[in-house]
Amino acid sequence: MDAPPHLDKPEPRWQALLAFLAVGGIYLALPRELIVGPVWLLPTLIVILLVPTVVAHRTGKRSLNRYLGLLINGITTIALIGSVVLLVKMLPSHKEDPLRLLISGAELWLTNVLVFALWYWRLDGGGPTVRHELKKFGSTSFLFPQMQVPHDERAQFACSHWRPRFIDYLFVAFTQSSTFGPTDAPLLARWAKILTMIQVFISLTIIILLISRAVGGI
């Protein structure tokens, strides 16, 4: 039996591209004290690496595309962790403006969501290219609600041939940073559990630091 037409259509990647650009834009908006290295470095690296990543995808160079994608993810993750470390070091001085501190914390929290959504999107099932080629139902790393619908009832919920897209991973990352753990999509893969622990730890660190600063605890 042939795969349904909507499964033959490649997964749109513009959402992931926007997420990468958003990370670069948020980084530029951070105070200089929370930026590792030159202000322009991370946004420039993101743009420079995105171009060959897109070209590699368009020309069918899968290995290069995947390598470059993982490289960008790794660079943005290191930059995020570096900024959180700088936030930890900056708070005891009590020199920062409270409003600016709150905005900076929100920016880092949002960056955390975007960075790990990109990790989940990139790694689940071998990545978007492999997911498209295999045309398998659901996910191999997350138990999304659509996967829990009984097989004979999936047609009525329009999820007979459902596969996650970037927005689904973004929702997972957002809820995990908000509730400090999995919500509607339990974790199946060990790598997903490890990344989730890192994401939740970063989110908790940012929120606890801001609360502590607000009550004058540190």
Image (cartoon, grey):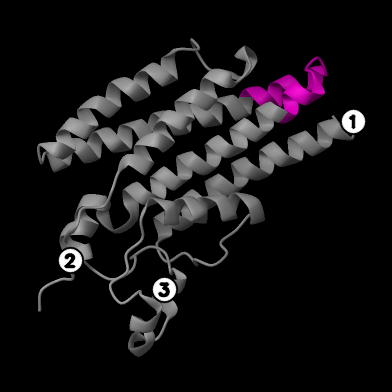
- Tag shown at residue 5: 2
Pinpoint residue 196: horizontal percent, then vertical percent. 51, 52
Q: Amino acid at mark 3?
A: Gln
With 79 as the anchor, is 161 left or right in this view? left
Q: Residue at x 42, y 20 (%)?
A: 43
Image quarter hosting the N terminus:
bottom left
Q: Would you place residue 25 above or below residue 70 in this image?
A: above
Please name the residue that numbered disc 1 is placed on: 216
Q: Is residue 91 magenta?
A: yes
Q: Amino acid at mark 2?
A: Pro
Callout in the foreground (3, 1): 3
The one nearer the camera, 129 or 161, is 161
Q: Residue furthest bottom?
A: 152
N-term-proximal mark, 2 vs 3: 2
Residue 203 lies in quadrant: top right
In the orientation shown, which residue stands out farthest toward the top? 38
Residue at the spot x=49%, y=24% of the render?
25
- CA neighbours of label 1 inside 10 A, class few (<14), some (14 to 19), many (20+): few
Give the magenta part as a residue range. 86-102
Q: Position of residue 158 (x, y in %)?
A: 36, 75
Total number of numbered discs in the rendering:
3
What kind of element bears circle 2? helix
Sequence-first tag of 2 and 1: 2
90 vs 197, left or right, is right
| Residue bearing the label numbered 3 | 146
Q: Position of residue 193 (x, y in %)?
A: 48, 57
Q: Is residue 67 above or below residue 94?
A: below
